[in-house]
Image (spheres, rainbow, N blue to C red):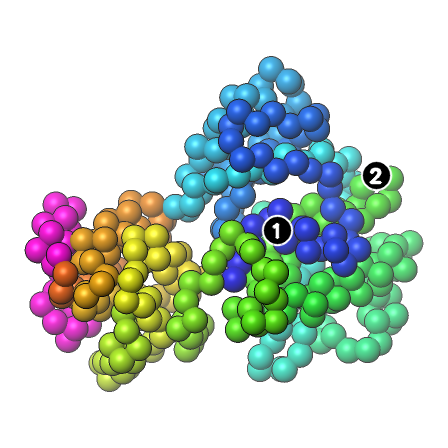
Amino acid sequence: MRLLEHEAKQLLSHSGVTIPNSELLRTPSDIPTLFPTVIKAQVLTGRRNKFGGVKIVHEQAALATTLQSVFAANIDGYMPESVLAEELLDIKQEFYLNLSVNRDEQAVVLLAHRDGGVDIESQPKDAFFREVIDNDSKSRALRLAEYFGLESHEFALGELLDQLLDCLKKNDALSLEVNPLVVTKAGELVAADCKMELDNAATFRHPDWNFYDIPLSANFVELNLRGTVATIANGAGLAMATVDAVQAAGYTPANFLDIGGGASKETVMAAFHELMKYSELEAIVINIFAGITRCDEVARAIIAAREEIKGLPALKIRLEGTNVAEAHTLLSEHSIVLYESLDAAIGAINA
């Protein structure tokens, strides 16, 4: 379960991490009291700067038009339903920090970089500070302070790492990324942005969870982060058969996903967005036998995904059941091929 920035920051603040003062705005007509301000689209994806989702407003006269433009920004297929208005920080330096659960090492791993902000993923792996979290927090804080060149902030960094680890554990988070971690000109450490992903499987431990991103499905299983073919199906048996057919054809399945018997356009769109985290996908195989689910609803989600999600892999689609004729018409109007069988859809991956 991915959190919006304002949701993640609220959890950070509960663990004592310093965050900027902010106001959450639900409509373009909501005017913030903070000024000057940074207007930030609240969406479940990164790269907001590149799509007009983050704007700095210095002049009151520009506030209304800026809010309208940020609310209207299409950010990798995501449209913001809210924006965050934050105080403009007096920044001296920016850094990168990440805590994540590493399943292979069965540990929490700390990653850090001297350069925070956009395009951090383009940095070579050997440029990052990396350590497995253990109980020796004092020496770890010293090593991180030396890496950052912030020896004067050794104690503050140690306290911050303890707070971030507390937040990760308390909230059953799989990853927690602060980018950038800002050092203000007054010497304060501030989490200027945060991305956080919580473990869907831990939902039963948190009856108070009420976040924007509803878990996609209890029946979503990651099989291989480097999988080449992702799958969407409805019904556990059909989903298993789809994964098996993909593997039998010589491809590496990325996931198992049963979207259930009453899937809507919103459910299917959420599935597409979830699958975009797999960076090596060649195709997404969609295998739906519709009863309560309607094929035309699935078709509309497919069309919307093609139009809105940048870099969407090739779609190989087999639909049968309720309203399949309407779905065929909709897809044909957008030059999207509908295959007669699952084997035909998988066979067309490299055709």
Going by the numbered disc 1, the residue's amino acid type is Glu
Residue 79 x/y as whole percent: 43, 41
Which residue matches tag 1? Answer: 7
Q: Which residues are magenta?
A: 323-346
Task: Determine the main secondary structure of the stretch shown in magenta.
Answer: helix
Residue 339 part of the magenta-drawn span: yes
Left or right of 296: which side holds 172? right
Quarter of the image for residue 11 reads bottom right
Mark 2 or mark 1: whose residue is earlier in sequence: 1
Residue at left offset 58%, top offset 34%: 25
Going by the numbered disc 2, the residue's amino acid type is Lys
Residue at left offset 18%, top offset 58%: 295
Residue neighbourhood size for the residue with mark 2, other residues' Cα within 10 Å, grouped as few (<14), some (14–19), many (≥20): few
Which residue matches tag 2? Answer: 185
Q: Nearer the viewer, residue 269 or 293?
A: 293
Residue at left offset 33%, top offset 71%: 258
Residue 2 x/y as whole percent: 53, 58
